[in-house]
């Protein structure tokens, strides 16, 4: 959410992690992110050695998705799992760059859906997350993938919770989970324990920081109060996650009457959820086309 602190190259360090005071070189930063991703996936028990894993590289999270893709390819390199990558038009233009950064080969697919980009660009954080998740889950079904990995990290979920609290939307507050199941497809967030500042620095290290032009598309409607809170979150470390999880435990007591949306897996008072109804997700999915890239 904030600009990372870039160190002078003393002893190879390029990054000062404010939450812990560690000085990290590019290799140590990557190792740290891979280790945290492995721990999150192990804790959620969301992945098997032979899974077909789908990873979307789409706007508005293209740079973050590219960073996640490299991390997952490193995690999965020793295993016989199969990686499937879905790209929108902007991703297809960067296909050679994306292939070059991966530690494990993957199969690539183009996805097209009528009106998806305009809905995501003009939406809130929650709308971005749920609409994209619905589209990606449907893509996974068509490609026979049982697991989807998406890039939102720790700070994203905390900000989403704060924004939903200000709007009084309990369903949005309940998004703070490292994995959600949607109609038999598991959606995991390997970067759930990672701060956005770490991801921003990693994007710089692997050379995709220039891809962030679209990453702010779903941030433009944040309340001023939330924007102020975001500035205060930088470098808070694990206490952020601990506080949010405690809040989530309390919220579950009042969220028992919510139902799961069949498209995005989010919770709401009705099914489909209000976000998917207003965004016309059913029509978007009907127009969805998934085709292999040769």
Image: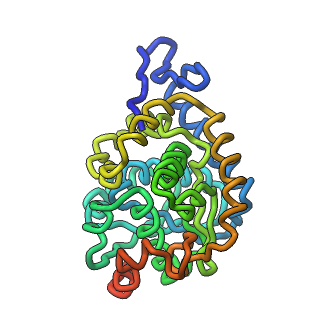
**Residue at 53% from the left image edge and 23% from the top image edge:** 18
Up the image or down, 221 lies above or below 270; here it is: above
Up the image or down, 10 lies above or below 262; here it is: above
Colouring method of the image:
rainbow
Determine which quarter of the picture holds residue 90: bottom left
From the top left corner, tell me how far across and down residue 252 is, in percent: 70, 61
Q: Is residue 82 visible?
A: no
From the top left corner, tell me how far across and down residue 222 is, in percent: 36, 48
Report the side of 181 relative to 61 (left or right). right
Determine which quarter of the picture holds residue 33: top right
Report the side of 40 relative to 209 (left or right). right
Quarter placement of the N terminus: top left
Report the side of 35 relative to 138 (left or right). right
Count of picture labels: 0
Report the side of 188 relative to 162 (left or right). right
Up the image or down, 180 lies above or below 232; here it is: below
From the top left corner, tell me how far across and down residue 96 is, in percent: 32, 56
**Residue at 27% from the left image edge and 79% from the top image edge:** 114
Q: Nearer the viewer, residue 66 or 218?
A: 218
From the top left corner, tell me how far across and down residue 292 is, in percent: 37, 77
Q: Nearer the viewer, residue 80 or 281?
A: 281
Quarter placement of the C terminus: bottom left
For this orientation, the residue located farthest to the bottom is 286
Q: Is residue 123 visible?
A: yes
Q: Nearer the viewer, residue 289 or 249?
A: 249
**Residue at 40% from the left image edge and 84% from the top image edge:** 282
């Amino acid at each position: 959410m904030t600009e990372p602190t870039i160190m002078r190259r003393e002893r190879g360090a390029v990054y000062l992690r404010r939450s812990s005071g560690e000085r990290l070189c590019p290799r140590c930063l990557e190792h740290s992110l891979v280790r945290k991703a492995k721990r999150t996936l192990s804790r959620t028990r969301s992945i098997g050695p032979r899974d077909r894993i789908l990873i979307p590289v789409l706007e508005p999270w293209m740079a973050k998705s590219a960073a996640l893709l490299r991390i997952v390819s490193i995690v999965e390199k020793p295993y016989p799992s199969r990686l499937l990558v879905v790209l929108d038009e902007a991703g297809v233009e960067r296909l050679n760059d994306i292939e070059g950064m991966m530690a494990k080969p993957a199969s690539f697919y183009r996805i097209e859906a009528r009106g998806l980009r305009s809905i995501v660009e003009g939406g809130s954080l929650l709308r971005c997350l749920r609409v994209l998740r619905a589209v990606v889950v449907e893509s996974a079904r068509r490609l026979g993938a049982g697991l989807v990995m998406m890039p939102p990290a720790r700070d994203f979920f905390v900000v989403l919770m704060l924004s939903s609290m200000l709007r009084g939307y309990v369903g949005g507050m309940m998004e703070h989970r490292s994995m959600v199941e949607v109609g038999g497809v598991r959606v995991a967030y390997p970067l759930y324990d990672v701060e956005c500042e770490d991801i921003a620095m990693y994007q710089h290290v692997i050379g995709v920081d220039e891809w962030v032009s679209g990453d702010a598309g779903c941030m433009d409607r944040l309340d001023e109060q939330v924007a102020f809170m975001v500035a205060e979150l930088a470098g808070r470390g694990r206490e952020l996650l601990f506080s949010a999880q405690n809040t989530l435990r309390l919220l579950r007591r009042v969220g028992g009457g919510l139902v799961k949306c069949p498209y995005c897996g989010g919770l709401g008072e009705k099914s489909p959820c209000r976000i998917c109804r207003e965004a016309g997700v059913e029509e978007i999915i009907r127009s969805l086309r998934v085709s292999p890239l040769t």
